[in-house]
Structure formats: structure tokens, C-alpha cells
Amino acid sequence: MVSASASKIFASSSNPLPSPIPPSGLNDLPYDVVIIGAGIVGAMLARELSRYKLKLALIDKEDQPGLGVTKASLSYIHRNHMNPPGSERAKFCVGSQDRFRALAAELGLPYREADEINIAFDKEQEQQIRTRLDWAFKNGETKFRVISKEEVARLEPRLTRDFTFAVYSEAHGMIHPPEWAFALTENAKANGAEVLLETEVLGLAQAPDGTWLVRTDRGNLRSRYLINAAGLFADEIAWMAGDRDVKLFKTRGTFAIFDSSVSSMLRHLVYVAGLNLSYSQAMGPTMHGNIILGLGWFKEPKDRIDTRVTKEELDCILRMGRQIMPDLPERDLITSFAGIKSTNNLAKPEDFYVGPSGVSPSLIYALICSPGITGSPGITRRIIELLADAGLELQEKADFNPYREKPYRFKDASEEERKEAIARDPACGHLICRCEQVSEAEIIEAVRKGARSIEGVKQITRAGMGRCQGGFCGPWILKIIARELGIPPEAVTRKGKGSEEVIRFDQIGASL
Amino acid sequence: MSRLYNNSDKGGAGAPIKLDLAIIGAGPAGLAAGAMAKRLGIKDVVVFDRDERPGGILPQCIHPGFGLLRYGEELTGPEYAWRAVQEAAAEKVDLELNSMVIEANPGRQICVASPDTGLRRYDCRSIIFAMGCRERTRPAVRIPGTRPAGIFTAGKAQRLVNIEGCMPGRRIVIVGSGDIGMIMARRLTLEGCAVEAVVEIMPFTSGLIRNEVQCLRDFGIPLLLGHEVTEIRGYKRVEGLSVCARGEDGRLIPGTEKNFDCDTVLLSVGLIPENELSRQAGINLDNATNGPVVDNLLETRTEGFFSCGNVLHVNDLVDEVSQEGELAAQGAAARLGLVQEPRTVNLNVVKGSNIAQVVPQRLLVNRDSRIAIRVRRPTGPATVRIGEAVKLRLPLTRPGEMITTTLKADQLAALYDQGENQELRIDCE
């Protein structure tokens, strides 16, 4: 079965372009809401708005939801101890863990929890942690307590003993954000939302009747309300709407991931004190059983796509990692990456701005910063209130389906589930990615649900995310994507147009 | 067709299937082990492999240079693999392809996932690990820069070109001077690509001298020794790469920066034995080889588990990998009582000056033993001393060239009598 399908792989030669925008152009009824940006906020908003009788569209310039800022973060659902009481951040982060847990159940997504240890190395940091503790209580958190060095040593024997003060807190959430953005979008789509990927907004204009005209590289559409959830590009979107006052301040952080074989070295999320967002030092388990290290001073990037990892930054985070865990397993470093975050000038320093634009109440901004993933449920709720305030009628659909079937995951399945799955579909037993134990069936499903690139498939299925970083499974994944999309291998991209992975033999001379 | 030949369905759906010997990996080590195991009279032997075809990495190695030791003639990788498969077939070795061993526990039970046979468990009297190795990746060598399309490990590029029929790109820079990198420099040049340079951080190549000569020098491909990659550029696709010379202290030398425009970067920065299953089974590993600690019958410190080929230590020549497979089968046959091997005392190998790794790490003194050594640093004329008695004089030594020798049982016995604390010290001076 497997070989037969494999032999079909190179048969097709068409190279389909993204289809034009569905016929909702100038002559048709406008959309009620168009959301620009399918990150965690845009995707969650689309899913929540799909409960209502609305004509709804979610637009993103990438080929898959959640591949922007959403992808590059620590990916924790933090408890409410890093947000100053009274801030928008504190407000929007209340109860996030409960909301994520509920969504995980509805959408068949993994959600795990880890406890956290905050440590301080000197008096100044100790004061910062005490401030955080105070914030936690003022924000309504209850499960925070000061713990002794001995207890920390018992809980995390490999942690440094050099710290002076520690606070313990329970039940921080762990998710894989791009997988969530993908699933939320999938559910929104199942409930009638239109999802327009590889669609870049080029211009915005408001008609005299208040309707917005959205010009994109794939056609125009009209909408009564617009949500700017464009992440690092939110300022450009604002400028297009005539709002020249929005400014984003961007910073870059570097992360390192260690192999899951060393996961037993660290069970708790460990945070070193620090009160502002420009500085972050954290190390902890991930959703997938790796260890993530996100440390260091955030530097200002060259531009919004400047996700270089420099030698200095990587050396720096590893050095700081060793400060937290002296026997940092550097041999088991499997990848490093940089992420860019932003703050903005509409909010108070280092806070969210979720509110109407300066130009019209029908254009709403979600200008956020860290902790954006944690805040996304609260932000979503707030945007829906703002839409209602601005006159959007929210009438619930009788047939809204909040559920998504939980996808098969070989690695997470029990022996019985695996046997049943393989009996149903042999591809469920054909392991393509050996490091992360991902079957062919999972990759096929991801592609059928909309993943088009190697990076996209990786973010959904984890294929290629392990210690060999796609060394063995890369060619297989390339073939499966090509086969499922009916395109030749040279049309398969790593992460969207312009990042084609391979070329044909007869293309070699083309540009030499 | 996903299998060449197959035994009939064994065992019921639920209960574990009993095997005398499970061999994990159908590359040259596993196939040779399978054939030899059958020859020695081991009955229920199955070789498992995750790929749809046997031969391991050989089918993608279409260059010649294989088989000189074993067959006395020069073969390509696919030809060598074909012989290995034929030899296994002649002994009626069962091959389970498309079958990935996902678990191995210390009680010698393995769990195998396959689209053809589903999920099965096997209780094995003995197990030979022959999983081979994987390539080190970019994070392991910490190359700074962006993460665009166009960065491949050399072996992955080799598979793309030689098996899948795709090219990785047009203008290539190869980072690292491992054998696969040098072989791909030649291969891609022959296909019409422009290979701009091979960049090696050390002052010497890490692969075989013959590859440096035949793949780089003969094709005029520039080799930059002692250069470090300082940045990979490009957002969607690789656009270029910068390098800088390193002084003897490891610091970059200002003013020696060079920029290359290229659309592709291949990495050939070392191989790592794939010992995830061995670790799961609780096998004791050697930090120097990244493979199990074994004796001269290639038995690990856990009874009934054997290891051979590149999962034991990265070899230079496939011929030696096959030989190790056969040796591991002899070990398994001895463990199963089919071959008499008096189990006497051990000598523990101690690594002396300029010795990076030695396999085996423990020697049974009652039998002949092949010893494989790698040095830390290259030298000119040198003497490798094994204990007090054995001296090997070599015109030069290099980390990239494995030094092998066979010690006879009587030599070992003599070494044992002379040695103290049951230790055998090996030095290169």
C-alpha cells in the first residue's frame, strides 16, 4: 500500500496557484467581519465569532495559520503573576488556564501543565520576585508560595544551588501555539468562516457608508468591520487605514531547544526574576517533552523578519542556561531560533491595546505583547464586546459545532489505539519521522486539512522536529506533500513561496 | 511490493512472538549478521528495517569504492547492498521491511510498528543492534544566521539526488569535510552545480584522504581549512554564507572574512550512532564512541544484547561494518550455546595519549580480537602501542582514518599476564 502510493509521487506536474478569493467581491454582500492575521488571536477570534450568524473571513499572508509571532515563543499559559495589577495584561490573563483547558477538550488538542519555580540570585531580584508574588495575589492567584532551597533541591536536583530566594506556583499551561491556531481555524471553517491564506493585504479604504474595502494580492473584498490582528505587521495595516500614529517597538529573543531524551533533567518551568518584558530568563519543559531555554536581553531586530540567531546571543543564552542548570546538556541541543515580539505606543508601556482605532470604531486593533498567547482568550472576548458596542448584531447559530475530532497521533496513542488505527488505515503504522514517531497518516491528514509546506507540516505533526531535524524523514515528507497536493516536488516549499526545497535536474543551469 | 521475501505470519495477534535473534536494521551490518546467524544454526532470526528496501544507506551511495576488502573488487553502494541482500536471502533470513522498532526493553522484548503487520511485540533470546548512524545537524555545530530553505545535511542531499531524483540547488557551499560532504561535492559538480567551496573548521579534513584527493582536488574544488562559518544569510531561501579564518587559539582572525553567494549549504559535520533504542534498553554507552561498551564478541554490558556497524562506532569502510555484523552473530550464537566460547577473564582498554576512542572497550582474552582505534589529533610518523607487547608503526595518523589491527588470543593472554589491574593501555606517540 505504501510503496504503491509512493510510486505515484512524481506523476503530476501541475503547479497550482492559490485559487482566487471566493466570489465576495464588490458586487456581493460585504463581509460582516474580516480578521487580518491568523495568529493565535485572529484564529481564536474567528472560531469564537463563528458561533454567530455572521459572514466572516480570516486572512493571512502566510500559507498556514500561526506561523508568525505565534510560532516563536515559550508557549506557556502563564499564571497571572507577571502582569501589574490593573493593567490590561492582568485583566485579559485572568482564568486563561481554564479557558485553554476547555478549548483543548472541545478541539481535541493537547494541553499539559507544569509547575513553576521563580528564583532570585540577589537582593534586587528577590525584591522583584516578592513584587510578582504580590501581583499574583492581587490578580486573584492563590497557589503561590515561598519555598525553601532544600525543597527546590528536592524538586529539581539539577538546578543550581546559588540562588537566594524562590517562589513556587502551580499549574501553568503548556501548548504548541501553531497547532492551536491551525485547529481553531479548522473549527472556524467548519462553522462557516472563510479562511484566505497566502493573501496579503495591500490597501484599506473606508467607503462613505462606513464599509471597508480590503485590497489584497488576490482580489478585493468589503467588510463592515475589520480586526487588525496582524502581529508584527499591525502598524502597516493601521497605516493603510490612514492611522499614521501607530508605532510598534520590536525586540528579538533567542531560544534553544534540547532533545526529549533529556526531559527528565527538568520538570518545572524555572524563571529568573525580572519585571519588565525586555528581559526574560526562563527554562522549562515543553508540551512535547523537550526542554526550552529562552534567555537573554532582547535585541532590536533589523526588520520584522530578522530572525537570525547570532553566535553571541546563542552563547549568551547557553551561558545563562548553565547558570540555572550547571550541567546543561549542551550535546543535546537540537535547534535554536529567534522570535520577534513587539510593544506599541497606543497602550501604556508594555501593555496590550485592544480597542478601536483612531479612525473608526469599525476598525478594531489587537496590539499585544507578551504574554499574548496567555491573553488570547481574554483579548478575544474583549474584541467581541467591542464589536457589539460598535453595532454588530451577534445572533447565535443553532448549529454551531464547537467540536473537532481529535487527530490520531501515533506517539500519544495507546497500544490498543495504535492497533485499531493501523487495522483501519495501514498508513497509521507507517512511521515517517522516527525521532518524533510520526506516521504517514498524520502527515496526510495535516496536508488534507491545509498544511502545504514542510514547516507547516512540522508545526502540526512534529515531523522533522526531533533530534535528526528532518535528516531522514525530510525527503519522505517532501514526497508526501507533493503527492497529496498533486504538485511536483520542486513546487513544495519549506515555508511558503520563494522557499522551494529542491529543483529539477534540468533546472540547474537556469541561473548559473 | 514492500518485502523481498517473508516468512509466514508467526504467532497470534496478542501474545508476543518468540525469536531466537532479532536484528534491528537491514543495512550491511544487520544483513551480514543475519546471514552469519543462520549459518551458525540460529533458527528464528528476523531482521527488521524501517525502510521499504534493505541495504541501509548503501542504495544512495552510488559512487564506487566499496567491497575492496570483502570481495576483492570495487563495487558501488547499490552493488554492495545487492550482494549483502543476496547473501542473506541465500541463508533464508527473514526480513521485515517497513517495520520500525519503536521500543526495546531490558527484558529483551521489542515492539515493532508496520503498515503491513500492524503493531507486534517480540520476546527475543538475543538482540543485535545494527541501526547505523545519523548526521549531526546545524544546531549541533551552532552555525549562526537565519533558517531558510536550502540547508541540507550531506546525506539527505545524497538521498534527494541519487534516489528521489531532485537537486538541492545550483550554487553550493559545503560545510564540514566529512566523507559524505566531499563525495557530494564531486557528485553535484558532475551534475552541473557550482560547488564554491568546502569549509572545514579544523586544520585538517575529517574524512578519508582518498576522498579529499578524488573528490575535491581532482575536481578543483576549493578546500578552506581552519575556517569557521560566521553566518548563513537569506530569509526564504539561502542567499549566502560568510566564513572567517581561525587562529590556533580558536579565535577568528579579523580581516580574513570571505563571503560566498550560494543558494544551498550542505553540512557534513559528523555522524552520531543512533542509540535511542539501546538507551531505552538500558545499555551502557561509551561517551567517546556514542555507542555501546562491548567486548570482542560485540556483546554489550547487558547480556544478550549485541551491537555492530555504525551504531557501535562510526566506521570508515562498509567492508568492516559487514565483518562486525558477522562477529556480532558469532557472539549471539555463543550466547545461545550454539558455539563454544570459553568465557574467561576480561581486559579493560584504557585510552592513553592521543587516543580518542577504542572498540572493543573490554577484551575476552581467550579469542582473537580486532581492535579499532581513532586518534585525537593528526600526527606524522607514529607508533601505536598496545600494552607492552604490541607496537604498530604508522607513516601518519589522522582522526579521519580508523586504525585497525587484530590481536591473537595468545598475544592477549600474554598481555593479560603482563598487565596490571586487568587493564590494557593504548597510546599513540
Image (spheres, coloured by chain):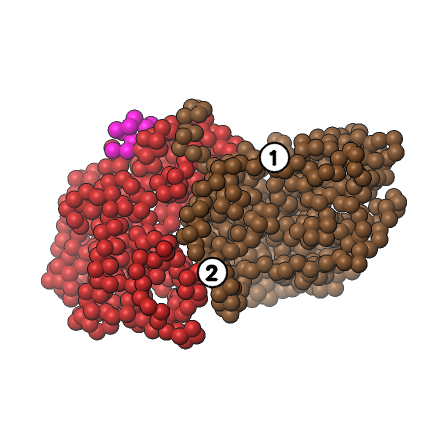
Chain colours: A brown, B red
* Quarter where residue A228 is shown: top right
Residue found 48% across the figure and 37% down from its top: A13
The amino acid type, in three-letter code, at marker 2 is Pro
The residue at which mark 1 appears reads as A305
Looking at marks 1 and 2 on the same chain, the residue that comes earlier in the sequence is marked by 1
Q: Are marks 1 and 2 in contact (CB under 8 Å)?
A: no
> Is A353 on the left or on the right of A307, as rendered?
right
Dot 2 falls on a residue whose secondary structure is: helix
- Residue A402 appearing in the image: yes
Q: From the image, which quarter does the C terminus of chain B lie in? A: top left
**Is A434 above or below relative to A280?**
below
Magenta residues (range) = B214-223
- Residue A128 appearing in the image: no
> Is B119 on the left or on the right of A78, as rendered?
left
In front here: B394 or B161? B161
Chain letter of disc 2?
A: A
